[in-house]
Image: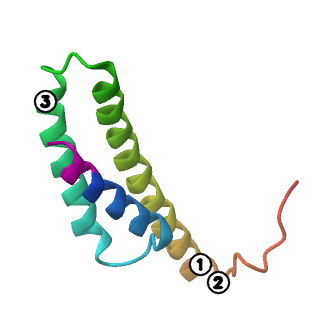
């Protein structure tokens, strides 16, 4: 029962991580949130530790995808306002 929603979530996560500035990511993130909501309902009733860990993993993937999108947006705004090209900017350390 968990295979299909988890598989979809992992696919969406991978797409967002590969293309964090894609305009379609907002709807993909909402779909990931829907999967997490669905799984969270089941987590209360699940006694299997492996399934509980899988549900926690899905929650972590959602958070990481959201963070990647926020960072990409912040970088894009910074580039527009500062005119900095991150690929050629000197790095510290």
The one nearer the camera, 86 or 5, is 5
- Say whether disc 2 or disc 3 marks the residue closer to the N-terminus: 3
Question: Is 30 within the magenta?
Answer: no
For the residues marked 3 and 1, what is the alpha-carbon distance in whole angstroms? 43 Å
* Most distant residue in the right direction: 93
Q: Is residue 49 above or below residue 3?
A: above
10 Å crowding of disc 3: few (<14), some (14-19), many (20+): some
For the residues marked 2 and 1, what is the alpha-carbon distance in whole angstroms? 5 Å
Q: Which residue is mark 1?
A: 79
Q: Is residue 55 above or below residue 68?
A: above
The one nearer the camera, 18 or 70, is 18
Of the 4 image quadrants, the one containing the N terminus is top left
Which circle marks residue 1 in the picture?
none
Q: Secondary structure at mark 2?
A: loop
Q: Are marks 2 and 3 in contact (CB under 8 Å)?
A: no
- Say whether disc 3 or disc 1 marks the residue closer to the N-terminus: 3
Q: Are marks 2 and 1 in contact (CB under 8 Å)?
A: yes
Q: Are marks 3 and 1 in contact (CB under 8 Å)?
A: no
In this rendering, position of residue 55 left or right of residue 43:
right
Image location (x, y in percent) of residue 8: 26, 59
The one nearer the camera, 2 or 67, is 2
Region in magenta: 1-6
Image location (x, y in percent) of residue 65: 41, 55
Q: Residue at x 27, y 49 (%)?
A: 6
Image location (x, y in percent) of residue 46: 18, 21
Q: Secondary structure at mark 3?
A: helix
Q: Secondary structure at mark 1?
A: helix
Q: Is residue 51 above or below residue 2?
A: above
The quadrant where residue 80 appears: bottom right
Of the 4 image quadrants, the one containing the C terminus is bottom right
Which circle marks residue 42 in the picture?
3
Q: Which residue is mark 2?
A: 83
């Amino acid at each position: 029962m968990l295979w299909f929603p988890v598989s979809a979530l992992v696919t969406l996560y991978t797409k967002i991580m590969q293309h964090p500035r894609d305009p379609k990511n907002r709807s993909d993130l909402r779909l990931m949130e829907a999967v997490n909501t669905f799984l969270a309902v089941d987590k209360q009733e699940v006694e299997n530790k492996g399934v509980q860990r899988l549900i926690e993993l899905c929650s972590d993937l959602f958070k990481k995808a959201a963070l990647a999108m926020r960072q990409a947006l912040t970088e894009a705004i910074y580039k527009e306002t500062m005119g900095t090209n991150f690929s050629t900017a000197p790095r510290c350390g």
